[in-house]
Amino acid sequence: FLVAYKLANVLRRLFAEGAFSASFLPVFSRVLVQEGKDKAQAFASQLLTVIVLVLSLFALLVIGQYRGVVRLLAPGFSPEGEIFSMTVSLGRICFPYLITTSVMALFCGILNTFDRFALPAATQILFNVFFIVTLIIGIIGGFPTSTVVYMLAVSTLIAGLVQVGLVWNAAERLKVAVRFVRPCFSPEVREVGRKMVPGILGAGVWQINLLIDTQACSFLHSGTVSYLYFADRINQLPLSVLGIALSTVLLPTLSKLIQGGRFHQAITEFNQGMSFASFLAIPATVFIITVPHFLVTMVYERGNFLPHQVAPVAAALRAFGCGLPAYIGAKIFAAAFFARGDTKTPVHVGVISVLANIAFILLLTPLLAHVGIALATALSSWINAGVLFWFLRRKSPLSITPKTCNCCLKQLLAAGIMGAGLILVRSLGEETFLMGSPGIRLSLLLLLVVGGFGLYGLLTYLFKAFPSTKMRS
């Protein structure tokens, strides 16, 4: 199921939530301000029709050739095996989710333009709700696992349709009438298409690397794809909260300042964003690296997730965590390039990162199995961030000031001391944690979280390494 769902999910993040949103919002806003609401509605209707038409044809092509797709996604699966056949069937059910989520992205962009943020954000939760409810029904109903995974595939598509209905209805309540019209590749529609092409690779290096990881996992023993998936789920929390949220805030802010010629203020905003990102990313990285077993045990170990499966997931989580600051930094650096209208540089650097990931996988997987795959993704993320930073210093008026560098070094020192404390507490309480009840485990984990981050906060205060509070909300 995870392999089958992977392609639709990666394309969703690359296309609908990544390149499409970044390309559509500026154009729609410009048309709305300069030409009025009627023209903006007409443009949105044209784009809706083109999106559904193009993606429907694309989906039919992919679904018809999904056996070949699975060979690419999971070349280690035997084409004659039951797992291969099930993956093909599940993928054909899941793939149309790309269409629904792309339409949803269009309406979310419209709502955001009219300063409606709560509903688009809440709608994203529906997918998880459907996923959880389906699992609960499968457990309570006593359905076999093979049936439950098909139920999950169907619920994915149903969730997408419900999401579209909610945001479409919200747009109607705002008197924004978006309808299916005769297909028309207007200048605005073509502009969105042109901007999307470089944005897909430039903004989606992590997702492409995860897709490559899935390919490599298919050659390893059964369960390896799940090990990486479970580890990535925990790692995605700080990635989403810090990397995606900060880049979303910085992109429009830096764009307005640079286009207005206010470079000094843009540099200030950029550095405040960097110091804020490092303030949160560095301790989160240290926490993931020092106590991954505690996190995995608390989140997953129950039911069919057995104790012996904690170690391989925790090892993958530690490897993914090593690349956390790099991924967040890369998102911020890429936002600085996009704000200047430079979409080519992140693309070129992204190609380097993907090639590096492949090379690291070939080098590390024979030695470390699935952990080598996760570590390869982390290392390639550091290459991506490092090369972006190097180009940023050469090609952009934005730069990291010595004050910000000094602040980051102090934060790193504080996080190092915090990490030493976590290791000490872990060594003293590991047996109690592993043998204790769920309540004891939760108490000890909360102690680590509150105590660790409390110590880090105190040290950064003493070191005067707090980020600036003047950063735009």
Image: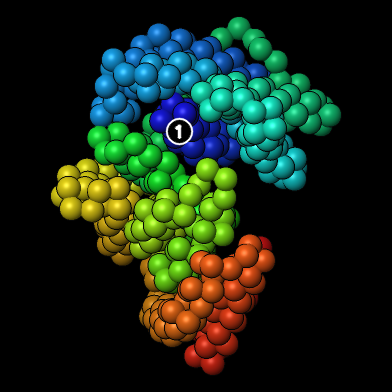
Residue 272 at x, y = what percent?
Answer: 52, 71
Q: Nearer the viewer, residue 272 or 243?
A: 243
Residue farthest along the front direction in this orientation: 435
Is 48 rendered above or below residue 237?
A: above
The image's colour scheme reads rainbow
Q: Say which residue appears at 43% left-offset and 13% top-offset.
A: 63
Q: Residues within 10 Å of mark 1 (few under 14, many from 20)?
A: some
* Residue appearing at x 43%, y 19% in the figure: 86
Residue 153: image location, x then y, percent: 55, 24
Q: Position of residue 140 (x, y in %)?
A: 70, 32
Q: Nearer the viewer, residue 346 or 448?
A: 448
The secondary structure type at the circle numbered 1 is: helix
Vertical arrangement, residue 349 with respect to residue 14, above or below: below
Residue in the image at 40% along x and 67% along y: 289
When asked about the image quadrant of residue 183, the answer is top right
Can residue 389 be seen in this snapshot? Answer: yes
Please give the count of numbered marks on the rendered protein: 1
Q: Is residue 160 left or right of residue 118?
A: left
Q: Is residue 290 above or below residue 206?
A: below
Farthest residue to the bottom: give it: 462
**453, 274: nearer the viewer:** 453
In the visual, does 79 lie left or right of 173?
left
**Residue type marked 1:** Leu
Instruction: List the residue tagged with mark 1.
Output: 2
User: Where is residue 331 shown, x and y percent of the image?
Assistant: 43, 54
| Image quarter in which the C terminus is found | bottom right
Residue 343 appears anywhere in the view: no
Residue occupying the point 52% across, 17% down: 93
